[in-house]
Image: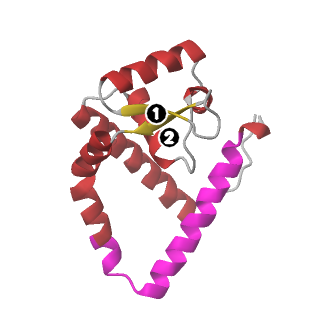
Amino acid sequence: MVDDAPEPQPETLALRRLQTAMADAEAALGRRMGMHPTDLAAMAHLTWAPDPIGPGELAQRLALSPAAATELVDRLTAAGHVERHRDLADRRRIRLEPSEQAVGSVRGHLASLLSALDAAASGTAEQDRAAVRRYLDRVTRTYADWADPDRD
């Protein structure tokens, strides 16, 4: 099969290099925290989800069986990384939330990285920073749309 896809734009190539560096940083965070990559991925979903999620949704997001997701949540809870809470609107539903201890630990590990990222941005003119934010927002929406399970 002949690949006739156009050459990616320089910004797309830079974004791919950034993604690789971010994956390396994520792996380093996992090593430094002594966490398995799946555990770390689960924590990322729980931390950045716009609304609290339950074990079933976490299983879907990580492509795990319900039994594997239960084992994962049990492991994260036993380690003090996750707390289970009853959903106030639907008492049958369980919400999973990162513990304050886990959030504090991640912040501590990432403090030097976040400071360096802030420093990298601080020397940039505000109008350029606004353009970067708009681009990253569009890229984020593009990734979310592409990854939407309804597309499968």
Q: Are marks 1 and 2 in contact (CB under 8 Å)?
A: yes
Q: Residues within 10 Å of mark 1 (few under 14, many from 20)?
A: many
- Image coordinates of residue 79 in percent, x first then y, are 29, 25
Q: Is residue 4 visible?
A: yes
* Position above or below: 104 against 70: below
Disc 2, SS: helix
Query: The residue under label 1 is which amino acid type?
Result: Ala
In front: 56, or 89?
89
Please give left or right for residue 41 compared with residue 137 in the image: left
Q: Amino acid at mark 2?
A: His
Q: Is residue 139 magenta?
A: yes
Task: Name which residue lies at 63% across and 51% down.
Answer: 143
Near mark 2 (Cα within 10 A), the count class, few <14, some 14-19 or many ≥20, is: some
Residue topped by disc 1: 42
User: Residue 110: where, in percent of width, then height?
Assistant: 27, 51
Q: Quadrant of the C terminus?
A: top right
Q: Residue at the location (22% across, 50% down)?
A: 108
What is the distance, in whole Å, between disc 1 and disc 2 at their CAs? 5 Å
Task: Please tell me the numbered disc located at residue 100.
Answer: none
Query: Residue beneath label 2, please?
Result: 45
What number of labels is visible? Answer: 2
Residue stretch in magenta? 119-148
| 110 or 47, nearer to the observer | 47
* Label 1 secondary element: helix
Which residue: 51% across, 80% down?
130
Quarter the N terminus occupies: top right
Q: Nearer the viewer, residue 32 or 52?
A: 52
